[in-house]
Image (cartoon, helix red, strand yellow):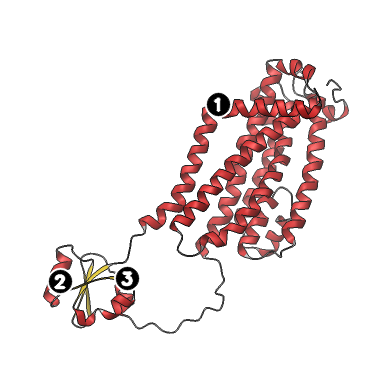
Amino acid sequence: MNTVQATRLVAARQIRVTLRDRTFLFSTLFFLLIAAAATILPPMLAGGPSSVAVTEAAAGPLRAAGLQVRTVPDDRAAEQAVRDGDADAAVVAGPTVLAMDEAPDDVVTALSTQPALRLLDPDAVDPVLAFLVPFVFAFVFFITSQTFGLQIAQSVVEEKQTRIVEILVAAVPVRALLAGKIIAGTALAFGQIALIALVAVVGMQFGDSGGLVSLLGPAIGWFLPFFLIGFVLIAAMWAAAGALVNRQEDIAAVSTPVQLAVMLPFFAVVFLNDNATAMKVLSYVPFSSPTAMPLRLFNGDAAGWEPLVSLALLLVATAAFVLAGARVYEGSLLRTNGRTSVRAAWRSRETAG
């Protein structure tokens, strides 16, 4: 069995085990429901235009504003329609707007004379989206890399703790074992994120009235390859961290650098997303570029060549971390006499397999 075949075998086994895990299935379903609810429910719950009872003579401006107009013979009938719940509001002589317990802003606006409006920055991103998009991108990368990365580390420790790793390395090369775990974790994480992105895009298309899909589409399109490569980098670090210990309880002690590598960029992107200089720097730092660069593309702050350069830097950094993680993994995988230091694993990697 060559290395490619062994890697494929390990990855397939890891994927099968995870797909049978109820926690993984429920978490995937949970995130899909959140994505669907967040994009479909707001337009549905927003409600339609107000229905207005009014005489035919005064109905013109209300119809022009897109309101639901119900014509009545006189002002008394208009008021009664509101009291009976047949209309949300009524317009009587004056003109005066009648409503039961809440001012109908759309009716008032339709009857008001508005001044001329000229936007100096018509392409500016909506403030609500400007707040939510960076948080969502950063949160998705953070929670996914933590969840699937921890699963990789736990899998490594479980194999060491049960001594099954000794059987595995006798059958397949050590690097094939590492590559299989990284590939399986990356495929599962990417598949989950791709499903969530698909549900979100479909949901936005279902209830989109302001071109939200066209705004978020390019950012989501770039987020997927950035996420794919960035997760491989994090997965290699999690696998190396898991190989350093022999008990599940010790994972937290050795995974602090990995968690900081994910947490610090998460908070940096969330809190500095309105700082153009900081975001430009973060979009080229490997640990933060998977969220910072798609965000800059969403805001229109990045030139066309920038995501390509950022992706290339991330790819180089990922290759370096995978090679370093592989060396630590090889040097500590067969050590079962307690926690192994990174220095010891680096200097005396096992040659088995």
Amino acid type, mark 2: Glu
- The CA distance from mark 2 to mark 3 is 18 Å
Is 205 located above or below residue 63 in the figure? Answer: above
Q: Quadrant of residue 2?
A: top right
> Who's the residue at 78% across and 34% down the image?
325
Q: What SS does tag 3 mark?
A: helix
Looking at the image, tell me whether mark 2 or mark 3 is earlier in sequence order.
2
Looking at the image, tell me whether mark 2 or mark 1 is earlier in sequence order.
1
On the image, the x and y values in percent for residue 185 come to 66, 34
Q: Quadrant of residue 5?
A: top right
Residue highlighted by disc 2: 79
Q: What SS does tag 1 mark?
A: loop
Amino acid type, mark 1: Arg
> Who's the residue at 61% across and 61% down the image?
298
Q: Which mark is residue 20?
A: 1
Residue highlighted by disc 3: 105
Q: What SS does tag 2 mark?
A: helix
> Who's the residue at 71% across and 34% down the image?
182
On the image, the x and y values in percent for residue 162 come to 68, 15
Taking the image as shown, residue 208 lies to the left or right of residue 75, namely right
Tell me, yes or no, if residue 157 can be seen here. Answer: yes
Which image quarter holds the N terminus? top right
Mark 3 neighbour density, 10 Å: few (under 14) some (14–19) many (20 or more): few
Q: Quadrant of residue 293?
A: bottom right
On the image, the x and y values in percent for residue 214 come to 55, 62
Q: Which is more foreground, mark 3 or mark 1?
A: 1
Q: Which mark is residue 174?
A: none
Pointer 3 with pointer 1, Cβ within 8 A: no
Tell me, yes or no, if residue 341 can be seen here. Answer: no
In the depicted view, which residue is nearer to us: 53 or 128?
53
Amino acid type, mark 3: Asp
In the depicted view, which residue is nearer to us: 330 or 13?
13
